[in-house]
Image: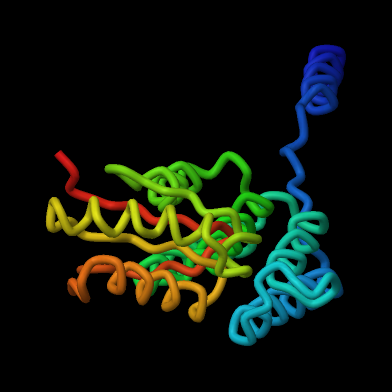
Amino acid sequence: MRICVTILLLILLSGCSMMVPDTVIDKPQPQQLRQLTLLLNEADKAIERGRFIAPQFDNANGYYRKVLVLDAGNEQALAGIQNLIEILSLKAKQSLEIDRIRDYRVYTSWIEQIAPSSPVLAELNALDPDRQTSGDSWTIAVSDLKARNSNAKKSIKQAALTAKAYQSRVKIIAPTDADGRWIYQQMRSVADEYLFRSSLIIGDKAKIVVLDVP
């Protein structure tokens, strides 16, 4: 009888030694938790100050990346990065609405630095004015525009007469507000003071786009 009990105990002990322990999940330690909280708070402050990806050592994207280095998959950091992309996307669209093309392109480039594969980029790139223009267009060399010379005036005259003939809307792209206003004044002077329906976009190029041309 004692032999049977001994054998039974040995079997039970052997079974226990073969049991696989529960998987241990590493949790952030108190010191690490304080560091993560500090970084997330700094990211919030950076967003409030408009420090989205710059300066180098004090920007929201940088703080979120530091959190992910310490705690890969941190939900707050991942959600923060997505929120950052949405903020920049909204600012890019608002810039387009008021014809601030340079600002639109800056915000778009920041999103590209944060998340190069984000579908938001495709949506914003489709709104780029250079891809949206239609109709006839005349490009003016910036050097000619600055010189206010005959080459610039020739292109402006052709654009003005075409726009007047078709009573078309006009989009003027110029490096500065003063350049754009000069182009518009030249258009009116060669078209018998015709009031063009125009919009001015500040950009790197000098260009007149006559829309609604059949």
Residue 101 x, y percent position in the rendering: 49, 64
Q: Is residue 1 left or right of residue 81?
A: right
Towards the viewer: 27 or 202: 202
| Total numbered labels placed on residues in the image | 0
Q: In this view, does 23 lie to the left or right of 206?
A: right
Q: Can residue 36 be seen in this view?
A: yes
When the figure is inspected, residue 110 is found, relative to residue 24, above or below; the finding is below
Image quadrant holding the C terminus, namely top left
Towards the viewer: 47 or 32: 47
Residue 65 x, y percent position in the rendering: 75, 59
Q: In which quarter of the image is residue 94?
A: bottom left
Q: Is residue 82 visible?
A: no
**Residue at the spot x=76%, y=65% of the render?**
62
Residue 162 x, y percent position in the rendering: 23, 51
Towards the viewer: 172 or 203: 172
When the figure is inspected, residue 60 is found, relative to residue 24, above or below; the finding is below
Residue 207 x, y percent position in the rendering: 46, 55
Q: In this view, does 31 lie to the left or right of 77?
A: right
Q: State how the image is colored.
A: rainbow
**Residue at the spot x=53%, y=63% of the render?**
203
**Residue at the spot x=72%, y=76% of the render?**
37
**Residue at the spot x=56%, y=69% of the render?**
148
Image quadrant holding the N terminus, namely top right
